[in-house]
Amino acid sequence: MKTCFYSCFYRSKLRKHYKLKGGGCGDCMLHFCCETCALTQEYRELQNRGFDMSIGWHANVEKNQGLAMAPVVEKGMSK
């Protein structure tokens, strides 16, 4: 029961990072009603974006430097 709240948080974070549609209450309900389905969707989304789940998180960060971190946004006008 407690794990669905953690995984719901990461699903929302994933949506925000990749600008995916949906979110909010739907994410929480999906994790509460069918945790396995929600985690499978997230796994496939990351896999389609070039992550290799078999090598672990840290190896993926090293392998996909541009994918694992949000882009830097400069503020204001440059000249």
Image: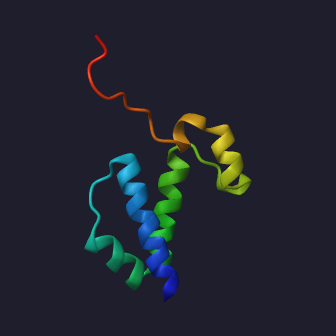
* Residue 57 image offset from top left, x and y in percent: 66, 54
14 vs 62, left or right, is: left
Screen quadrant of the C terminus: top left
Give the percent coordinates (x, y) of residue 16.
35, 53
Q: How is the image coloured?
A: rainbow
Residue for point 35% across, 76% down: 28
Image position of 29 (left or right of 54): left
Looking at the rendering, which quadrant does residue 13 occupy?
Answer: bottom left
From the top left corner, tell me how far across and down residue 42 is, in percent: 48, 61
Give coordinates of residue 10: x percent, y percent: 46, 64
What residue occupies the far top of the structure in this picture? 79
- Count of residue discs: 0
Identity of the residue drawn at 27% across and 74% down:
25
Residue 33 higher or lower than 40, as above or below: below
Please, is residue 13 above or below residue 5 in the view? Answer: above
- The residue that appears at 48% across and 75% down in the rendered structure is 6
Q: Residue 71's quadrant in the figure?
A: top left
Seen in the picture, residue 40 relative to 18 is either above or below; the reply is below
Comparing 65 with 41, the one in front is 65
Residue lying at 54% horizontally and 34% vertically, measured from the top left: 66
Q: Is residue 48 left or right of residue 59?
A: left
